[in-house]
Image (cartoon, rainbow, N blue to C red):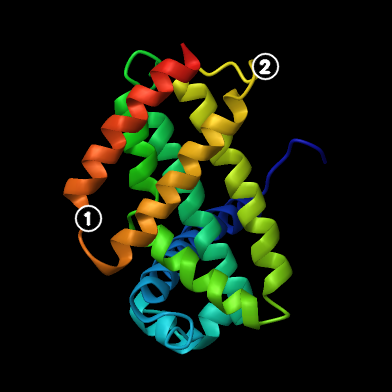
């Protein structure tokens, strides 16, 4: 009968919820471990077994959540990219058009952490792996659109104005370049000067 639950139903639900929670926790540990492995060891050194060991789960459990290596690593980079987007928005809950230097600095930070290093390894792998390439290409296009949208919102940019869209995209391209430079050396001092100059340029370009 609709709306009537038996003792068995309630017990089943009680058993099921903790299992679902454990499953979500396992999946998250795997994703975080995959990103860390990819950032530290690159594609060649990041196998499902290595990730499973780092996450503290069995290889079988890892493959239950992610049947292939490609599934695991594309999901991992996507997961952290979404987390970083949420974190970036949370830095400026009321918007930040009045402090564009802070926005530029936050955007640059997106490209100087483990997410960017992991994504870079994934891009290199995708250039040689036919099975991986279309998935990474689609993922990067989506992440790129989301990052651009966040940047426009935070900067208070009106993209109907001439050159505004290109200016915002140029900022993101610059941030990516700084992230690449940071892979080899700690370039914090130069990065600060570049961030300050870009904030001035954005004030002039965006009004």
Left/right placement of residue 8 relative to residue 106 reads right
Can you give x and y, in whole percent of width and height, for residue 71 in the image?
63, 72
What residue is drawn where x is 45% and y is 24%? 154
Residue 201's place in the image compared with 53, above or below, is above
Residue 44 in sight: yes
Can residue 95 be seen here? The reply is no
Percent coordinates x, y for residue 45 in the rendering: 42, 87
| Local secondary structure at mark 2 | loop
- Quadrant of the rendering where the N terminus is positioned: top right
Q: Earlier in the sequence, mark 2 or mark 1?
A: 2
Residue at the (61%, 25%) spot, across then down: 163
Whole-number angstrom distance, CA of label 2 to CA of label 1: 35 Å
Q: Is residue 84 left or right of residue 195?
A: right
* 46, 27: nearer the viewer: 46
Between residues 1 and 205, which one lies in front from this camera angle? 205
User: In the image as oriented, which residue stretches furthest toward the left?
Assistant: 189
Residue where numbered disc 1 is placed: 187
Q: Nearer the viewer, residue 149 or 193?
A: 193
Where is residue 196 shown, x and y percent of the image? 27, 31
**Image position of 191 (left or right of 175):** left
The quadrant holding residue 26 is bottom left
Mark 2, Cα crowd under 10 Å, few <14 / some 14-19 / many 20+, is few
Residue at the right extreme?
1
Q: Nearer the viewer, residue 30 or 187?
A: 187
Figure quadrant of residue 169:
top right
Provide residue 61's location: percent of width, then percent of height: 52, 80
Can you say whether 96 is above or below 46 in the image?
Answer: above
Q: Which residue is mark 2?
A: 160
Judging from the image, what secondary structure is the residue with disc 1 in? loop
The reply to whether callout 2 and callout 1 are in contact (CB within 8 Å) is: no
For image coordinates 61% across by 28% down, the residue present is 165
Instruction: Specify few, some or many for label 1: CA neighbours under 10 Å numbering under 14, 14-19, or 20 or more.
Output: few
């Amino acid at each position: 009968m609709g709306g009537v639950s038996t003792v068995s139903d309630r017990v089943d639900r009680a058993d099921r919820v903790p299992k679902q929670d454990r499953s979500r926790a396992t999946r998250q540990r795997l994703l975080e471990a995959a990103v860390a492995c990819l950032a530290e060891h690159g594609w060649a050194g990041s196998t499902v077994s290595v990730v499973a060991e780092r996450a503290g789960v069995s290889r079988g459990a890892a493959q239950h959540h992610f049947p292939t290596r490609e599934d695991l690593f594309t999901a991992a980079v996507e997961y952290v990219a979404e987390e970083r987007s949420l974190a970036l928005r949370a830095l400026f809950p009321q918007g930040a058009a009045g402090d564009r230097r802070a926005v530029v600095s936050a955007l640059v930070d997106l490209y100087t952490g483990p997410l960017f290093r992991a994504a870079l390894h994934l891009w290199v792998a995708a250039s040689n792996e036919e099975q991986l390439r279309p998935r990474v290409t689609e993922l990067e296009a989506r992440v790129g659109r989301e990052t651009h949208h966040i940047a426009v919102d935070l900067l208070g940019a009106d993209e109907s104005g001439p050159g505004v869209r290109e200016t915002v995209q140029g900022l993101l391209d610059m941030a990516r370049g700084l992230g690449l430079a940071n892979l080899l050396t700690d370039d914090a001092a130069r990065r600060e000067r570049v961030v300050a100059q870009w904030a001035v340029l954005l004030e002039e370009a965006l009004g």
